[in-house]
Image (spheres, rainbow, N blue to C red):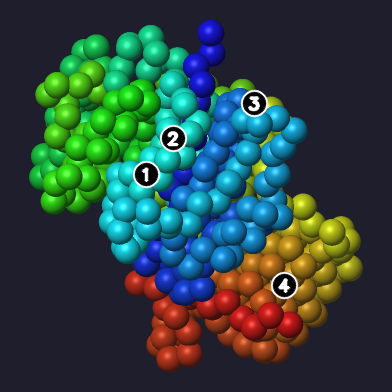
Amino acid sequence: MRPRILAIILAGGKGERLYPLTRERGKPAVPFGGKYRIIDFVISNFVNSGIYALYVLVQYKAQSLIEHLRNAWRLGGLPDHFIIMVPPQMRWGESWYQGTADAVYQNLNLIRDFHPDLVVIFGADHVYRMDISQMIAVHLDRRADITVAALPVPIDQGSNFGILEADETGRITRFEEKPKRAAAMPGDATHAYASMGNYVFSSDVLVETLVEDARRSTDHDFGRTIIPEHVAHLNICAYNFLDNAVPGVQPYEERGYWRDVGTISAYWQAHMDLLGRQPLLNLDNDRWPIVAASYQGPSARIIEGEVTDSLIGEGCVIDEAVIRRSILGRSVRVERGAVVEESVVMDHTVVGQGARLRRVIADRYNLVPAGARIGGNTDADRLRYHLDPSGLVVLPRGQTR
């Protein structure tokens, strides 16, 4: 029989390295790809995998995320089909979530009331596709207590990740956060297993470990506390993300595409990965769709101009302008003589006549003045805008008109 599964999505992250995109919202609510929010990827993965009971734990500047989930995601008709947002309840004390494990511990009542066989705990901060049911099947086949999603990374990059050391059966024997020298994964001396921060727990094991952890002074975190402290006496297994097969993926796409878009440069590069005849991540996949909020406005209009290798959102108006290798969100207007290159321009932004944007990320509701030159001049950009160390210029969210 199919196990009873409850999903918990950890969506309370601040995303400090994405500032100023996170000035008024948490990281999972940051727009992505012209029509999505970052959280849409993990929720779409759950729904496409046939998992429909989802609690989303929110915390930091959550209103934007709450409004998005209310507008974009509605499951109903059956008692176990729901997406419910859960702010901190402070049931065990007057404190915010102290770590990922503490966030789930503070909501143990949800688990006990649902009576699941398995609890699947995923973060909401990454861009990827994954059939989660395949990870669950491996968890059941190995009779694991905990299964950790693992992404093979070049061994010389292991110091940037939490590294899982596993034996030939896939059982994890050690976990170390950002080691100086990473241990090789089984059968491949050139790669190491990096934890993706996604877990499958047998329900009774999860409850027992969280209750025990809450009694002690720890980091109350799955990666820093729960996994390292229990590898010796629990059956904790690694699930190789490269074994995951999602229908509809094209041969030219990057195998096991997964991006932590936690910095401005990584966020911008992930957008560039969507472009080209053979994008590393092709969002045009009707067999594994990433779902976004519906848009009630008109179709995009290109009155005249040049548009090359770009994604253009609904409701956009391009009037004698040039758009090259860029992503425009919904209801963006680019006026005569403007040039937008290698940029991400979010919803309801106006790029004035003759303005030029190059390697710019413009948050929603911006008004770029006519004739403005943004990007490409480090000294000038630093004086007027937010200049990322990567050289990208970021325009914070404008005022709602």
Mark number, residue 248: 3
**x and y percentages locating residue 27 in the rendered image:** 47, 60
> Could you tell me how far apart the alpha carbons at marks 1 and 4 are, in whole angstroms?
37 Å
Mark 2: which amino acid? Ile
The residue lying toward the viewer, choosing from 156 and 53, is: 53
Q: Which element type, helix, strand or loop, lies under badge 4?
A: loop
Of tags 1 and 4, the one toward the viewer is 1
**Do the numbered discs 2 and 1 sit on residues whose CB atoms are within 8 Å?**
yes
50 to the left or right of 221: right
Assign the C terminus to one quadrant of the image.
bottom right
Q: CA distance from mark 2 to mark 1?
A: 9 Å
Residue at image coords 47%, 26%: 115
How dense is the environment of label 3, judged by Cα within 10 Å: few (below 14), some, or many (20 and up)? Answer: few
The residue where tag 2 is placed is: 111
Please provide percent x and percent y for residue 88: 43, 57
Q: Which mark is residue 104?
A: 1
| Mark 3 and mark 1: Cα distance apart in space | 34 Å
Discs 4/3, front: 4
Q: Earlier in the sequence, mark 3 or mark 2?
A: 2
The amino acid pointed to by label 4 is: His
Q: Quadrant of residue 277?
A: top right
Where residue 182 sits in the image (x, y, percent)?
15, 36
> In the drawing, what numbered circle is on residue 348?
4
In the figure, residue 137 lies in which quadrant? Answer: top left
Amino acid carrying mark 1 in the image: Val
Q: Earlier in the sequence, mark 2 or mark 1?
A: 1
In this rendering, the label closer to the viewer, 4 or 2: 2
Q: Residues within 10 Å of mark 2 (few under 14, many from 20)?
A: many
C-alpha gap between disc 3 and disc 2: 34 Å
Marks 4/3: CA distance? Answer: 32 Å
Of badges 2 and 1, the one in the foreground is 2
Disc 2, SS: helix
